Image (cartoon, rainbow, N blue to C red):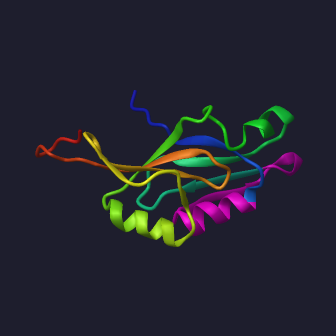
Amino acid sequence: MPASIASVALIVRDYDEAIRFFVDALGFAVTADAPLVGGKRWVTVRPPGGGTALLLARAATPEQAARVGDQTGGRVFLLLQTDDFRRDYTAFCNRGVRFAEEPREEAYGTVAVFLDLYGNRWDLIQPRTDEPGEVA
């Protein structure tokens, strides 16, 4: 059976502030925004070029609210892959995205950790393609 990860839930404080960050700062597109019962919404955003969507899930309990910005205990949560690291790094900086470190070269590619609006850590990464047809 072919399968793929369609979306990943990201706990947010507020739908609209999260949408603004992902659209305005990261260049994502809103792919769904539908009302649900109880004041909830089904909101998904996706990076340019497609890929797995983020389901922006507003925290509904005190336990969920406590995890906003710390979904992985301080580790990098998601990796945003680019085909032009310098272009996207510069664009993100110009749009106010906060980077936790300077870009660096690793065996697998060029990478820098940035923070989303809540403080979750992300990698902006351009994989190295040293061998024809291979991504390290």
Q: Is residue 64 magenta?
A: no
Left or right: 32 in relation to 7: right
Residue visible at 48% across and 57% down in the picture: 47
Nearer the observer, 8 or 2: 8
| Quarter of the image where one finds residue 15 | bottom right
Left or right: 40 in relation to 73: right
| Residue 91, percent from left and from top | 45, 70
Left or right: 135 in relation to 18: left
Location of residue 103 with respect to 5 vertically, above or below: below
Q: Residue furthest top?
A: 1
| Residue 27, percent from left and from top | 51, 66
| Residue 100, percent from left and from top | 52, 51
| Residue 22, percent from left and from top | 59, 60
Q: Quadrant of the N terminus?
A: top left
Q: Residue furthest left?
A: 132
Nearer the observer, 104 or 46: 104
Residue visible at 72% across and 42% down in the picture: 68
Left or right: 43 in relation to 54: right
The residue segment tinted magenta is 16-40
